[in-house]
Image: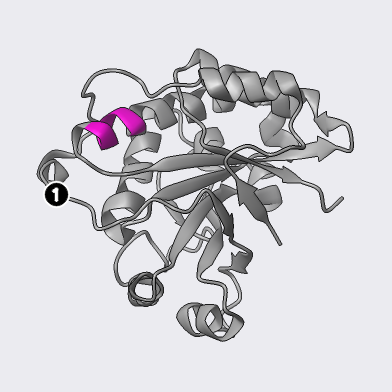
Amino acid sequence: MRRQATLLAALAAGATALLALGSTAAGAATTGGGARAGAESTARPLPDQVFAPYYEMYDTSTDLAALSQQSGARYLSLAFLQTAAAGSCTAYWDGDTSEPIAPASYGADIAAIQARGGNVIPSFGGYSADTTGTDIADSCTSVPGIAQVYESLITTYHVSRIDLDVEADSLSNPAGINRRNEAIALTEAWAAAHHQPIQFSYTLPTFPTGLTTAAYAVLQNAVADGARITTVNVMTFD
């Protein structure tokens, strides 16, 4: 289970300073939003502190909206989005080509959760994607292409936060790390220009003493790329 907060006490002081320096990229850059440009989002920003446990998108034996209501968890992190094969710029739920980012894929469930005052946090990556080159930023070499995937989640499901779970091999892929953060900054600029509320969070590995050196470097790169990271979730389960 995950507890998210705007600033986590577990972060070292240096990492906290890095987060404070992050800022939304200036300008009204777009990544092919075209017809979506004038659309107003119905998304609401998440609370400063929110309980958002993982929902395993590969588990087809459960119902997303029903489980949210039965458990009392109004917010769910949807794990995970990834490409079907390395080199692709198209993300699917659990990498399953039959579950694209589209209203037909979980749209009704997500809308039901939102109608009850909650929301979902789509999460990219995870161990499986991060070890097979199918995390979107590892797989796709086009920064605008990655940003367009992020934008499609915002406009399709009216989400207000997107999570990036970066671990394993993805932590040692500088090109992927840089593309991911550049795409975040590009998406944030697009969202500001089109009045779409959006936040980005990172889920990163940690030691009892704080973030790993590689995880800390992800945040340093985010600052360098002008990507604003709202929340850092530390992986304490190991």
Q: Residue at x 43, y 31 (%)?
A: 184
Under tag 1, what secondary structure? loop
- 199 in the magenta segment: no
Q: Is residue 190 magenta?
A: yes
Q: Residue 111 versus residue 125: which sits nearer the camera?
A: 111
In the image, residue 156 lies at what x, y percent? Answer: 28, 58
Q: List x then y, in percent, for residue 101.
A: 36, 59
Name the spot of residue 210 as percent of width and height, x first. Answer: 82, 31
Magenta part of the chain: 188-192
Looking at the rendered structure, the kind of residue marked 1 is: Ala
Residue 134 seen in the current view: no
Percent position (x, y) of residue 99?
Answer: 42, 67
Residue positioned 30% across, 18% down in the render: 26
User: Which residue is nearer to you in this view: 89 or 108?
Assistant: 108
> Number of marks in the image?
1
Q: Is residue 5 visible?
A: yes
Q: Quadrant of residue 37?
A: top left
Q: Quadrant of residue 186?
A: top left
> Magenta region, mostly helix, strand or loop?
helix
The N terminus sits in image quarter: bottom right
Position of 193 with respect to 187 (left or right) is left
* Residue placed under numbered mark 1 in the picture: 39
